Image: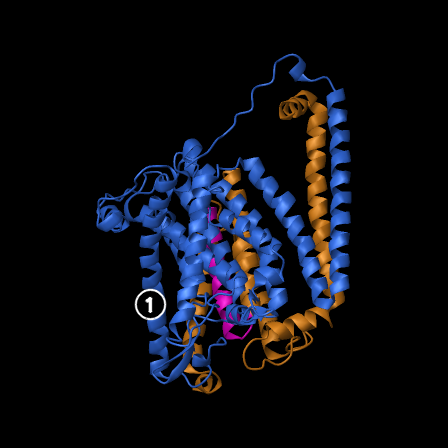
Chain colours: A blue, B orange
Amino acid sequence: MGNDPLLSGHITWIVVLIVVIKVIVAFIALMISVLLAIWIERKVISDMQNRIGPNRAGPFGILQSLADGIKLFFKEDLVPERSDKFIFKLAPYLSVIPAFITFTLVPVGGIVHIFGHTTELQVADPPIGILLLLAMSSISVYGVMLAGWSSGSKYPLIGSVRASAQMISYEAAMGLSIASVVLLTGSLSTRDMVSQQLGTFFGFIPHWNIIRLGVIPFIVFIVAITAEVNRPPFDLVEAEQELVGGFHTEYSSIRFALFYLAEYMNTITMSAIMVTMFFGGPDGPDPQFLHWLWPIAWFVVKTAIFFFIYVWFRAALPRLRYDQLMDLGWKVLIPVMLVWLLVVAAMRVSRPLGFAMVGLGIIGGLLLYRAIAVGRDRSTARELARPSRAEIEPPQDRREDHGAS
Amino acid sequence: MIIASVISVPQLIVFIVSVAIIAVGGVGLLTARYPVHAALFLVMTLFGVAILFIEEGAEFLAAVQVVVYAGAVVVLFLFVIMLLGVDREELASFAGDTVRVALAGVGVALILAVLFIVATGAWATGADSSAGKLTAGSNVGVLARSVFTTYLLPFELTAALLVIAVVGAVILSRRMVAETAAIEPAHLSERREVQQ
């Protein structure tokens, strides 16, 4: 049933009540942070693009996303004529529910005493822990994929085929970087990951996984997770300039709002997961008063920083082309992470073996790179030797997409 | 009343709900008129089985069930269905075909017989449980230890088999491209030119 001390004893009504309260509080907190996140994103991006952004509803326009939500509620709800009605209505929920379930895994604070019971400040702490994140990210593929297919229209279908290829590709790199964290922790539980990161090196450098693992798994994870939740610069799924609106072109009203909600829930959840896996979760300096509050505050601050980084990505980076996206996933992230996983495993055995593995990885990588380059040159030479149509017709210019959202 | 002495009421409720999910998914898979709906019913069945795994204490199997089968295999099914455009109504039905119905009946009888054998003894599988008795909490560690020590050779052989399958698939698809290039060399070399 999990490692939570709350559930280890006899399950009484009060225990059930505490669990229900935790679920409701987590849900409301996530909803409010989504409202704030949309507002912050719009404000920050408009600052970066030298314009004002929303400033009408409430002080500094802070109620803008609430107003937008209410407006979407009262809009006409269209179901396209040629759509698959049931799946069209089902798809938004398949996006939202995995986003929330993943958030339940995140430890938001320390251990508290409430109503005479001891409990962890997280909704669920199952023994499979972080595997649930992988399971839910593979379920959220369905939301996007089925939304595109069931719309019965061309552009959404292209968007959803892109989306599923992209999400499956990056899941591998994401899983490998999670595996390195699991290898170091020796447990799948998110609570164990956090408690293993307590303490410091030499008294002042925090004992966080980003330092213990080398920075590489974190970089792979943040790139893979950005692609996984279809945030810019990996938002080829939506690509306004090419695909109208991608998989949610045909959606309107509250169903569209659900997709929008899912995107921001995912972004916040993934920021929180990164904090949990690489930045010590609720770990941080703890002045001796208000003992329960500080971990929550540190957690919120760290998560907010990562959300800001996502917004910054969106404002600063142009969208990748599809072949660049696939090359980055399969030819860079997965090989690098495979070698680094071996290095982490060797470091667990002994230091010299670890550094030997780093050396072996570099030599092996260079050999492989050279072999691929030689092979590519040979096949190019062979094809150039054949008579080509390009000698008759001039080649067309390659279209370049400068996607900036 | 015999059931109530073996498992508790919450477990019984979970069991009934998950079995209902599995049954609805299975029947739906067979009766669905569109291939995409059939694939989604398959996902539903896989979820029901995952819930049963969790109830049996096999959390790791449940997670793998969802990640691998629901998350990858069925997504690939859907991918193929959507790309090949077979997502139209499927009208093939063998109701009325006596031979096929009889064969289906034999199949169902065989499955029931196998289920009976598995339920009454362990000789079909060799042991009740390879990962050892379930202690309190998680059995992920126990499973990992037995996979990476006692059963290391079969595990590595399975991994090698999968790699061979992937390499084989890549080679087969590359050969097809090479043959197409031999028939129509201009097309490929044009693309090559453009890339440079």
| Residue at screen point 59% across, 80% down | B134
Indicate left or right for A7 with A180 as reference: left
Q: Label 1: which residue?
A: A25
Vertical placement of residue B79 versus A196, above or below: above
Q: Where's residue A197, x and y in %?
A: 55, 68
Q: Which type of secondary structure does the marked residue at label 1 adopt? A: helix
Q: Where's residue A76, x and y in %?
A: 23, 43
Vertical placement of residue A142 versus A16, above or below: above
| Quarter of the C terminus of chain A within the rendering | top left
| Residue at screen point 65% across, 70% down | B144
Which segment did they paint magenta? B33-59
Whether residue B120 is visible here, answered yes or no, is yes
Indicate left or right for A285 with B147 as reference: left
| Residue at screen point 57% across, 70% down | A203
Q: Is residue A339 magenta?
A: no
Q: Where's residue A262, x and y in %?
A: 38, 52
